Image: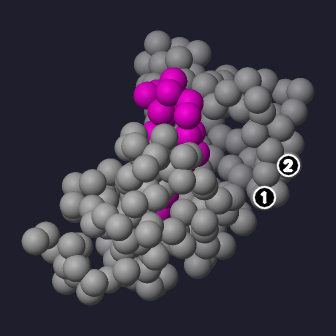
Amino acid sequence: MERYGGYDVMTDDFDVGGRLKALRKQFGMSQRKLAEAAGVPHGQISMIETNRSSPSVASLRKILGGFGVTMSEFFEPEAISAQKPFFTPSEMRDLTSLLYQGDELALQKIAIRQVGDAKAHNLQILHEVYEAGADTGASMIEHDANEGGIVVSGEIEVTVGDEIRILKAGDAYLFNSREPHRFRNVSDRPAEVISACTPPYL
């Protein structure tokens, strides 16, 4: 028997199936989309959600990776809302798989991590790393928010509407996210960006 956070993953101490289903719907994902994002068989998601199969800790961790949700967030959803002021790198939430489901190139080239509970604070703070050749996609991004950021290292090509600019370390951007936008690393080295968005778009 395996335990996590005081719960028996293999028993009825915690409704793993119900929690997984509710979380999947919260993120607006079908069982198939989640299975693809997590790299597991489609049938496995269905079996777990209907409590016909109890996942191991390793399997559950892999599935939750499809959301970018940690085990602690899964077993203790209220903990996400805790007004915790400080975070170590390991406590930041990985959003990469959630943002770039099915885009293998982006998943290999882009890493995006969020500080704390963005929804609770109505502010999304991100640490973004774009490897050489990374691209958020030819299909421009648009969402109902405002965002800005500072390039910490390397350089990144940012497109906002009809404007395109290559930003280097120390350069910054700030724009209405309703404007179609795109980020590309056209250099031969990684680019690191610290950004903020309000309201959160995830």
Q: Position of residue 83 (x, y in %)?
A: 46, 84
Question: Label for residue 178?
Answer: 2
Pointer 1: residues within 10 angstroms few (<14), some, or many (20+)? some
**Figure check: 30 above or below 116:** above
Residue at 43% x, 28% y: name it: 108
Q: Is residue 101 magenta?
A: yes
Q: Is residue 97 magenta?
A: yes
Pointer 2: residues within 10 angstroms few (<14), some, or many (20+)? some
**Figure check: 146 above or below 71:** above
Q: Which residues are magenta?
A: 96-116
Residue closer to the observer: 12 or 59: 12
The residue furthest front is: 52
Asked if residue 50 lies left or right of residue 52, the reply is right
> At label 2, which amino acid type do we have?
Arg
Residue under pointer 1: 145
Question: Label for residue 81?
Answer: none
Is residue 87 among what the camera can see?
no
Labels 1 and 2: the sequence-earlier one:
1
Is residue 164 among what the camera can see?
yes
Instruction: Specify the quadrant that holds the N terminus.
Output: bottom left
The residue furthest top is: 188
The residue furthest left is: 1
Look at the numbered discs 1 and 2 and tell me whether their residues touch, using CB distance below 8 Å.
yes
Q: Position of residue 125 (x, y in %)?
A: 55, 59
